Amino acid sequence: MTDVVLNSGDTAWVLASSALVLLMTPGLALFYGGMVRAKSVLNMMMMSLVTIGVVSVLWVIYGFKLAFGYEANSQWYGAISFSGLGSAVNELTNNGGVYPIPLLAFAAFQLMFAIITPALISGAIADRTKFTAWAVFVAVWSTVVYFPVAHWVFAFGNKVGDTVTGAGFLASRGVQDFAGGTAVHINAGAAGLALAFILGRRVGWRRDSMRPHSMPLMIIGAALLWFGWFGFNAGSSLGANGIAALALMNTQVATAAAALGWLLVEKIRDGHPTSLGAASGAISGLVAITPACAFVAPWAAVVIGLLSGVICALAVGLKYKFNFDDSLDVVGIHLIGGLWGSLSIGIFGSAAINSVGLNGIINGGGVELLGKQAFGAFFVLAYSFIATLIIGFIIDKTIGFRVKADAEVAGIDYDQHAETAYELTNSGRGGFSS
Amino acid sequence: MKLITAIIKPQKLDDVKEALIAAGVTGMTVSETKGFGRQLGLTEVYRGAQYKVDLIPKIRLEVLVTAVTADKVIKVITEAARTGNIGDGKVWATPVDSVIRVRTGESGEAAV
């Protein structure tokens, strides 16, 4: 590796992107927090915050090695190692080739993905999840589901000369996922669906008003997600280069188009375009363009985004048809949007845009790439759904996954955290106690 | 003595208050409240899910008046609160047995 030296521009971009992607998780907390009722906003946000804590610690102890170590030379997992990243300080990143950035920059960047993926799941089980059970779930799910799946999708192997060892199952089969359509969004969406079944519907679902309590909070969260997503997608180039610029531009235009697509559906179907629709549409566009952002032309990103907004606006109604309480539409937006985005590469993929990309249907590549994409998408969907059902079932039968019904009705914030979000009256609140 | 109670649209409060002051009324009590009448509720839509808001925000305005001015006050409120749309509210009067001004101890119409 003596011919590759550290590049300060690339390193600076990946470090900055890591910070951008971290910001998405507090952003998600605000986005989700605004969408729940006032009595459960703190619990909703705490599920994201504790995920940052749990996953960061696991990542250093064994998570990064389990996802991106290559010592085991396995397509299913990286390496079982508890070295605590101590030996990584002077290494460069090798992921299907050497990148001129420190391994620890890559490890930090990937950590932020490992954090937000389980945090996304929490939206499916709002208002009713026992906090300690959630923290345990995050630890187990990250270990059994996210770390291995990240290896399948994002680990391109240790390349020395022409020999590549330890590449992931899907990465080595040419499934294209630039920034996490499968590993992040389909993965989180399928897990959210499984947990919605395990925990069951909220008390009063489809009877009580469960209207979101703060649209401005939700919009601030969506804005932070959009901002951080430039690091998520453009940072995934692992360098400050043309592919990063392409990914950033595609992220912007797909998101903008998706917001318009969702609003269009609302205007035609419901009569009024809504702020929640604009924000939800934007998120659906971010989700869909995530796997595709480095493989398609900007005009195609507009089409992918617009259709994502339309498809997801229709998909969020499915829970009422099938009677499952995916409270904040993790399935309708992340699973459906992730599926569409992953498959869209098989349609719009362009080898002329990205030299490591392949042509999709419209660029003369036939259906081969679409087939690969479908295989990768449904493989991750099935694994995540089944593994999450098992993990969720065990947690529910042992420590219990759900708070008592009266605590849920009174408000989970006070029951789980002894706090309430808003002080709206001055009388009758008592005083300082010891 | 009569107690005039009016349930009106929140956006008409300022009009009603000014009209009452212009008509010589010297005090009133206003509270924010919720309810429904023939208007029934509103429908809000979040991600395509319709939520029926059946108790909608209203203003409850109460004025103590002497018996002879009651009809005039009711007329003033009714005219000032009217938009002509459904949900304009209601005004009613109830007889009052006794009234005492707390500070002075005056009672009856002198305390109104």
Image (tube, rainbow, N blue to C red):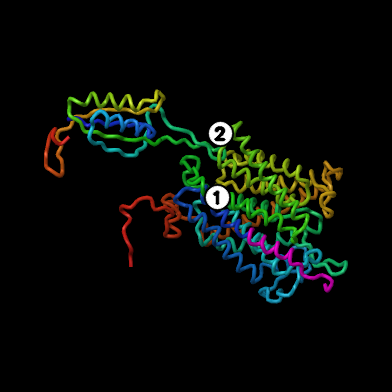
Under tag 2, what secondary structure? loop
The quadrant where residue A134 appears = bottom right
Q: Which mark is residue A220?
A: 1
Seen in the picture, residue B68 relative to A88 is either above or below; the reply is: above
Q: Earlier in the sequence, mark 1 or mark 2?
A: 1
Q: For residue A14: magenta?
A: yes
Name the residue carrying label 2.
Answer: A272
Residue A413: image location, x then y, percent: 45, 55
- Residue B35: horizontal and vertical position, in percent? 37, 34
Vertical position of residue A369 compared to residue B16: above or below: below
Q: Quadrant of the N terminus of chain A?
A: bottom right
Range of magenta residues:
A1-20
Within-10-Å neighbours for mark 2: few <14, some 14–19, many 20+:
some
Q: Residue B97, labelled with which disc?
A: none
User: Relative to A395, is B91 on the left or the right?
Assistant: left
| Amino acid at dot 2 | His
- Chain under disc 1: A
Q: Amino acid at mark 1?
A: Ile
Coordinates of residue A417 in the picture (x, y in percent): 45, 60
Q: Are marks 1 and 2 in contact (CB under 8 Å)?
A: no
Q: Secondary structure at mark 1?
A: helix
The residue at the point 70 percent across, 71 percent down is A80
Report the magenta stretch's main SS: helix
